[in-house]
Amino acid sequence: MAGFLDKAKEQAQRGLSQGKEKVGEVQAQRAGQDLVRKLGAAYYAEQHGTGSAANVQQAMAALEQHIAQHGDGALR
């Protein structure tokens, strides 16, 4: 009986860790998508005279930092 409980506990812990990993991936993807949106908005504003090149550079730097931490797969 103890062997069964140990296996069930191990499987539950494995499932929990996989779930946490998946949540982390989804959060990274959402953050990446938000950064891409901000970059697009900064670029659009710059092209229409209401933004600055500095804003575009800041948005690009934030996006590049995110990619360095999470890889470009986090943008999908």
Image: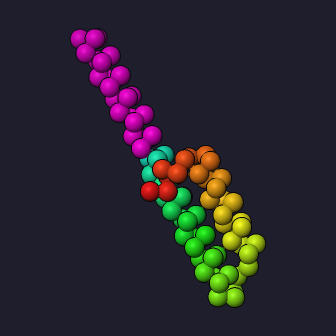
Q: Is residue 41 above or below residue 36?
A: below
Q: Position of residue 38 (x, y in %)?
A: 59, 70
Q: Is residue 61 above or below residue 14?
A: below
- Can the viewer see residue 27? no
- What residue is drawn where x is 23% and y is 11%? 1
Q: Position of residue 72 (x, y in %)?
A: 52, 51
- The front one of 26 and 12 is 26
- What residue is drawn where x is 30% and y is 18%? 7
- What residue is drawn where x is 66% and y is 63%? 60
The image quadrant that residue 2 belongs to is: top left
Q: Position of residue 45 (x, y in %)?
A: 64, 82
Main SS of the magenta part reads helix
Which region is colored magenta? 1-22
- What residue is drawn where x is 57% and y is 73%? 40
Outermost residue toward the bottom? 49
The image quadrant that residue 76 belongs to is: bottom left
The image quadrant that residue 48 belongs to is: bottom right
Horizontal arrangement in the rendering, residue 67 relative to residue 29 (left or right): right
